[in-house]
Amino acid sequence: METEISPAATAARVSVVVIGYNDAEHIADAVLSALRQGPSVAEVVAVNDGSADATGEVLDRLARRHDRLRVHHRSENSGGCGTPRNDGLRDATAPYVMFLDSDDVLPPGAVDALLAAADRHGAQVVAGGCVRRELPQHRDTPWQRALFLEEAVYDSPARLPRLVRDTLCVNKLYDRAFLDRHGIRFPDGAYRYEDFVFTARVLAALPRIALVPDTVYVWHVRRTASRPSISLDRSGVEGWRARLAAHRLAVVTLQRAGLRRLAHAARVKFLDHDLRMYLRELGRRDEDHRAEWWRLTREHLATFDEADLLAARAPARWIARVIAAAEWPRDVERLTALAVRPARLLPPYARVDGRPVWAVDLPEVVIDRVDDKPLHRLPVTVDAEPELGVDVTSALGVGRPRLRLTLRVHELYGRLAGAGGPAVVDVELRHHDDGRLGLTRDAVLTPDEAPGVWRAEVLFDLDAPPTADAPATRNGTAPDVWDVRVRVRCGDGGSLYTAARAVGPGLRRTVAPGRHGLLLVQPYATAGGSLALRVARGPRPALRVAARAVRRGIAQRL
């Protein structure tokens, strides 16, 4: 539901600061999205941070057409986002200010929604919803959705420690006089994650803050871009070092302001979000990177206390304890599986003196609370091994692609056996983009040859006649992606729902003639290790998938 806009919100009282560096391709869209907010925007201040491409020329052309656009050209690149934002803040003249990056956009009505809330509540800071939009798929993921479910106002950030989880500076409207009065600015120069520090400085100044449910910012995520954004560039350990430094300064800022609950919440957020996000990629790094990452992380975790660990989610807490206890990198595959969502705790499942522990040689790392958690909250591992085949269904030799899944459910410290043992597994295909239900199957689970494992097989006819139960594809368009989800039902009536983990040699593509033309099926492991199916019907999408695979292969050899 759109927030009602007050008449006062139509006054030109907002400066939008747009920063850009070597982004001639996108910066015009960002600037125009700000100008199109309407009369509430008094001016757009665009800061060209010493670009070597045509960014400056694009901005100058726009400025000749739009009186509300002013351009600030820096002669040298600052190396970060803080300095150009500070330049724009210094040049701004309106009572309120917002920040916008050159590769993102403001959705229609964003400024009015924020300004109206500032008027209604007398707030120095107003924050709204942000969506991360994956391009070119146009798949949206809300950022910190729980904060923006309904309109709210807080006399002080201390009343809602969860505010520290929203580290963005771009989904907010700021009272410029408030920022000036408290001397709040971004760190200058080549300082990464400057928004962490800026946000902490804002919260430390104790503004009256309002939250609105409106989406006020669209954060574009271009993972295939030739030059990844700062937030997406996690290839080198220096990015992690910079993130740790920014987090430390943010926590210190909150502590010095006497906001101990917010500082505690910031450390818990680090465990639940930052640590898990970077750990998920550690298995793809070389030995030197892993060693330095591990050293830096252990050093940082030494500043946390037991209360911080206990307040974090169990997977993050267990991960932190392993890293703190082990001097050198170990069990990276197990840690990575625990860091993904949904979390999986891979075997072995050891006990020492009756206590569940990470490993026999690491008994100080107790897997606490695993004996007490409800079944549906346990990080149980369900492996799925795909096997694609083509069954001949007529005398003419027409084949139909079939997918056989071999499922293995792993015990977890005796919890499944204690629930009567896994009895039945329900397998479903869920569309990755819209969540709709596709094919479903169920099977009885029986004990496997390996101890503590239950096994079942299901068979999917991927070219079944289109029904509400079938994964129909969009003929002639982009391939469909289906996530494999499972529900394990135990003998005592309890159950758990999770994503199947992709294992085995069957992660390869198969092309077969289907009922309605060529059908390409490709089981693959997602970034989090879960099993998904890419299904393309017709020659064009099938060729498109094959071409992408060829390009990836060439890139890997270069």
Image (cartoon, rainbow, N blue to C red):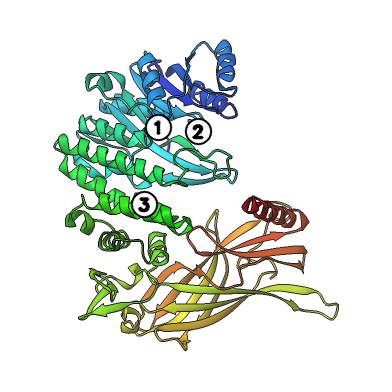
Quarter of the image where one finds residue 91 = top left
The x and y percentages for residue 541 are 72, 54
Q: Label 2 near label 1: C-beta < 8 Å?
A: yes
* Crowdedness near tag 1: few (<14), some (14–19) or many (≥20) residues, C-alpha within 10 Å: many
- The kind of secondary structure element at disc 1 is loop
The residue identified by callout 2 is: 104
Q: Nearer the viewer, residue 473 or 177?
A: 177
* Alpha carbon distance from label 2 to label 3: 33 Å
> Which label number is shown at residue 440?
none
Q: Is residue 128 left or right of residue 357?
A: right
Q: Is residue 498 left or right of residue 358?
A: right
- The kind of secondary structure element at disc 2 is loop
Which callout, 2 or 3, points at the residue further toward the start of the chain? 2
**Kind of residue sitting beneath label 2:** Asp
The x and y percentages for residue 443 are 52, 81
Q: Is residue 196 left or right of residue 57?
A: left
**Kind of residue sitting beneath label 1:** Val
The x and y percentages for residue 136 are 60, 43
* Crowdedness near tag 2: few (<14), some (14–19) or many (≥20) residues, C-alpha within 10 Å: many
**Kind of residue sitting beneath label 3:** Glu
Q: Nearer the viewer, residue 174 or 59?
A: 59
Quarter of the image where one finds residue 363 = bottom left
Q: Please give the name of the residue rendered at 62% of the width and 53% of the height, measured from the top-left corner.
A: 556
The residue identified by callout 3 is: 292
Residue at the extreme front of the image, as rendered: 288
Report how many numbered discs are placed on residues in the image.
3
- The kind of secondary structure element at disc 3 is helix
